[in-house]
Image (tube, rainbow, N blue to C red):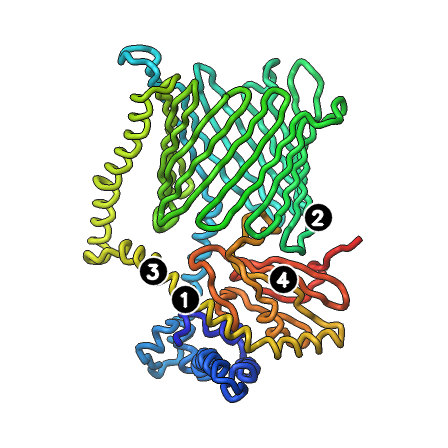
Amino acid sequence: MEVEPGNYYAVLNVSPDASEEDIRVAYKRLCVIFHPDKHTSVADRKAADVAFRRVRAAYEVLSNAESRALYDVFGNKAMETNMQIVPSGKHVREFKSEYERLWRMDKNLKKLHQLAPATSLQIGYDLTSTELDSPGRRITQVAVSQSKQYRIADSFDMSTTVSVASQNGVGIANLALDFRRLLGAKWRMSTTVNLNNLMFHPLDTRPRMGPVCEFCTNPLEPDDRLGHVGIAVNIPRLRPSHLSLSFNLQHQVSPSISQVIELGGVSATRILPSEVGYALTYKRHPLQLAASFSIGRFNRMISLQSRYTIGGFELRGSCRMSVIESFSLNYGVSKFALDGMSVSGFTIHLSPSLVSMTFRFQIGKHRFTVPITVSQSICWSTLFYSNFVPLALGFTYEQVLSRPIAWIKTLIDYGGVDVNNKSRRRSDGEEKDVVMENMRRAERETELMKSHADRAAKEERSRNGLVIQRAWYGVFEENEEYPKLSDVCFSVATQLQICVVNSKLILHQGQSKSQLSGFFDPCPGETKRLKIVYMFKGELHESVFGDLDPVRLPKMSHRVETT
């Protein structure tokens, strides 16, 4: 079985600067588990043989100084082409220094992309008039905004957003400053300040400052419960400041079901909330469903939403009923590029008083939106054109611009080989087969580890050492420091207990956890994380790590405060 390039060190769980003795010890520790002679049943011997050949291939390369030097520079390609080192005193160090320089350059480019400014342009158009020279056929709104994030420290960052908008003859310029800081393992504080040219207008009651504090009440369970408390401060010119509180409670019922309860409008003069909301969400690829309702002082609303992903397309639909708008229906399609950097799509909005369509284009962090008001009432001609025009524009763009440009670029770069179609076929068929095969391999390896992991945990428990209680690896739902489990996660407690040596767990930086024994990559190309809950000296600890982040346990900062 082949080992992916650049992962021999991860297979043995040693650092790139490990000594020959460290490599030998790691190899022997894995041989105790995976050597075929250690197992009696035919199925176990077959699974152990596959895992042992994987470990053996890594050891044969890293235990030889010459092959290891070539592997450090060229990866698996050096082994496939039988490269040899010619006598020289410097060239290996020169190759390594050049490789390190390119690695640092790539890391800096990724950081610059993350901190690059995001731009948004929105142009609204009104088609409600039937006469071409009517003033009703005009641009109704133009909005431009740009935001940029600044990383001040590991636990503190700031973002600025500058926006200029004009709608129905009213112009507004706004500067928003957002400060975010991690206060501890469970607390996060953020503050948003808005400054604009209508700041002291007597009729403007929009919030000028919004401090938000978030607290994770129980981060250790799979159904993480998150509490969110927000305070909005209004500073109008003609009346004193007024404080209002809003509460948001999120509960992860299961990896695919979550619920949200919202309470708003609480103040010193109004103890009972004036706004109440509830939402229930179901997420399981490729389908997402959501149902919600809200009761406010001036409006009551209930809505149903759905999303379905098929290939590179996402189908969206929603239905909403409220006091202000008796009925509204929204549906649309979005298309994602293979590189994940560009998105294009449209949305149709239907209601008794308005028919509109919105076109969206996004390339990287730059977004362009065009909302178009088609009619103020529903009729058959309006329905036909509002559905036909987006589909015709999308088909024309795909056939006339997108595919010819991609073909020309492929012809220039790769000599006519359609890499995109090849990648699409691979992602549709072969990638799923590879993931399923790797999952079965990981399950077989985990079964071989269980008895050894139980003995190791019992020994650690007897001396009050490091015992892995629970651990998950895969894609988590984004939620800042404490992400929620998704349906693309699997348990890795047994696999990590095997890696514990002398009450210490060390996983090295820059090595994907998917290459460890008993692990696999459940979703290639997506961001994965590792969440570990462990006991050390009778106390509970917990932490979350990125796929390439180093792991060193135990740490006092991981300790969970219990009441």
Say the numbered circle drawn on residue 532.
Answer: 4
Mark 3: amino acid: Gly
Q: Residues within 10 Å of mark 1 (few under 14, many from 20)?
A: some
Regarding residue 59, the answer to whether it shows in the image is no
Gap between marks 4 and 2, in whole Å? 17 Å
Please state if 486 lies on the left or on the right of 315 as rendered.
right
Label 3, label 1: how many angstroms apart (C-alpha)? 34 Å
Query: CB under 8 Å between callouts 4 and 2?
Result: no
Circle nearer the N terminus (3, 1): 1
In terms of depth relative to the viewer, which is nearer, 404 or 281? 281
Kind of residue indicated by mark 1: Tyr
Q: Mark 2 highlights which residue?
A: 217
- Between the C-alphas of marks 3 and 2, the distance is 42 Å
Q: Earlier in the sequence, mark 3 or mark 2?
A: 2
Which residue shows up at 56% across the image and 46% down it?
Answer: 151
Task: Name which residue type carries label 4.
Answer: Ile
The residue wearing badge 1 is: 99
> Which SS class for mark 4?
strand
Which residue is denoted by mark 3 in the rendering? 429
